[in-house]
Amino acid sequence: LAKTTQPISMDSYEGQEVNITCSHNNIATNDYITWYQQFPSQGPRFIIQGYKTKVTNEVASLFIPADRKSSTLSLPRVSLSDTAVYYCLVLYGGSQGNLIFGKGTKLSVKP
Amino acid sequence: GAVVSQHPSWVICKSGTSVKIECRSLDFQATTMFWYRQFPKQSLMLMATSNEGSKATYEQGVEKDKFLINHASLTLSTLTVTSAHPEDSSFYICSCYGAGGFYNEQFFGPGTRLTVL
């Protein structure tokens, strides 16, 4: 599994756009980039997944450059309820693989 | 997304006793379930992978005789912490694979907080 590196923590204010970047230099051809969100004392929740370029859903956008060695999770207009830990994972496509969680990024949204 | 439940949501027990945690997939059949453990301010650590009808596969360093996993049906997996000790106090989370539209998408339960006195 490709190793990922992301900032330990980030601070933001309500209404701002937050971008969390994840590095995955040894990503393989069949790997997908996936982000999960975890609130305290809860299980993680799938946010978004992508392979290349840009993916957008009702919650976030995921930007992936052509070399795919990094990706950026973008949260538009965050609110206090977006305070959570965000995990970036690189997964081999098509297999029932295990999820190996890194340390994640603790996002703190302030009023 | 699919719904996964865990029971109990929290449990306090005395040292030396055994505790059983249930994980259920409520609206889909999960051929594979995973069990994770999370200590305070740390990330999730995979403990074992459980496939319906077969023995669980444990990660290195996880004692299979201490953490008994049973996956008897496509909707239920149980984790039994045997002879629990204070160092087993942790947040235990299960996840189910098999219903999402994304690669390796797993649906997580709400977790079980275990405190061993």
Image (cartoon, grey):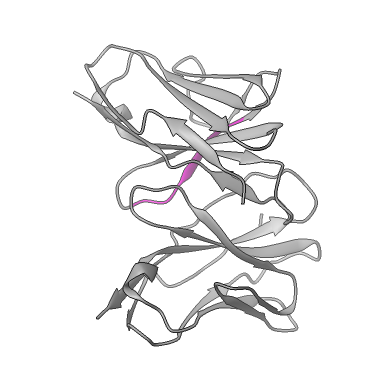
Q: State the residue at coordinates (70%, 45%).
A: A97
Q: In this view, does A20 lie to the left or right of A12?
A: right
**Toward the viewer: A95 or B21?**
B21
User: Is residue B59 shown to the viewer in this render?
Assistant: no
Residue B76 x/y as whole percent: 59, 24
Q: Is residue A63 above or below residue B45?
A: below
Q: State the residue at coordinates (64%, 44%).
A: A98
**Toward the viewer: B34 or A2?**
B34
Q: Report the magenta residues as a range.
A: B42-49
Look at the image and tell me in which quarter the C terminus of chain B lies: top left
Determine which quarter of the picture holds residue A69: bottom right
Main SS category, magenta section:
strand
Q: State the residue at coordinates (72%, 63%).
A: A32
Q: Which residue lies furthest to the front in this view?
A: B27
Q: Is residue A14 left or right of residue A28?
A: left
Determine which quarter of the picture holds residue A104: bottom left
Residue A93 x/y as whole percent: 77, 56
Q: Residue furthest left?
A: B117
Residue A50 x/y as whole percent: 70, 69
Determine which quarter of the picture holds residue A109: bottom left
Q: How many callouts does the rendering have?
A: 0
Q: Magenta span has B46?
A: yes
User: Is residue B24 shown to the viewer in this render?
Assistant: yes
Q: Magenta span has A31?
A: no
Q: In this view, does B75 lie to the left or right of A37?
A: right
Q: Is residue B102 left or right of residue A81?
A: right
Q: Residue furthest bottom?
A: A16
Residue A79 x/y as whole percent: 36, 76
